[in-house]
Image (cartoon, rainbow, N blue to C red):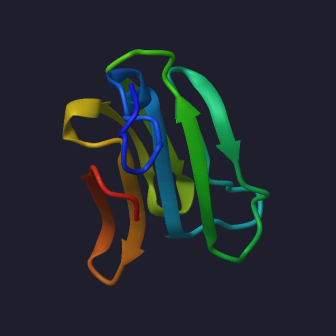
Amino acid sequence: EYNKWKKTPIPTTNSLSDWSFHFKNLPQDEGQPVVVNIDGKEAFKSKGEQDPVSTVILHSAGGSQSVKLQLQVPVMGVDQIWEFNSADGTNVKFELTDAGLAMKQQSKQF
């Protein structure tokens, strides 16, 4: 279905399965890479260097309304699994702040 004014496709519910995961300033160290697993599969692994990791992972859930993400940040002792539902937004950001690891989920792009 098309919008007659803009001639652009109107988003359908299938577009909700496209996820955007943002990671900002996550610490790593030699031999201690940041690892991200999505639905049980490795989606990202940093090089295990001294510079903080910032990256974006785009993921298609194949029509599924939820996705499980495991984030491993050994330097911080983080090894946790989150389950996200597309109804809460398909844009997720993890960021190291002065207060620690912050996570935000929203509909709008970051």
Q: Is residue 97 above or below residue 92?
A: below
In the image, 99 versus 60, the foreground residue is 60
> Going by the picture, which residue comes out furthest to the bottom?
98
User: Which residue is found at the position 72% from the left and 54% from the top?
Assistant: 46
Count all numbered tags in the image, as a single digit: 0
User: Which residue is found at the position 51% from the left and 16% from the top?
Assistant: 62
In the image, 40 versus 93, the foreground residue is 93
Q: Is residue 6 left or right of 73 when viewed as pictured? A: left
> Going by the picture, which residue comes out furthest to the left?
88
Q: Quadrant of the N terminus?
A: top left
In the image, 93 versus 78, the foreground residue is 93
Q: Is residue 110 above or below residue 9?
A: below
Residue 77 on image: x %, y %? 44, 54
Residue 106 on image: x %, y %? 26, 52
User: Which residue is found at the position 72% from the left and 75% from the top?
Assistant: 50
Q: Is residue 93 above or below residue 87?
A: below
> Going by the picture, which residue comes out furthest to the top?
63
Residue 87 on image: x %, y %? 20, 32
Q: Is residue 98 left or right of 19 when viewed as pictured? A: left
Q: Is residue 12 above or below residue 94?
A: above
In the image, 74 versus 41, the foreground residue is 41
Q: Quadrant of the C terminus?
A: bottom left
Q: Quadrant of residue 80?
A: top left
User: Which residue is found at the position 31% from the left and 57% from the top?
Assistant: 108
Residue 56 on image: x %, y %? 59, 55
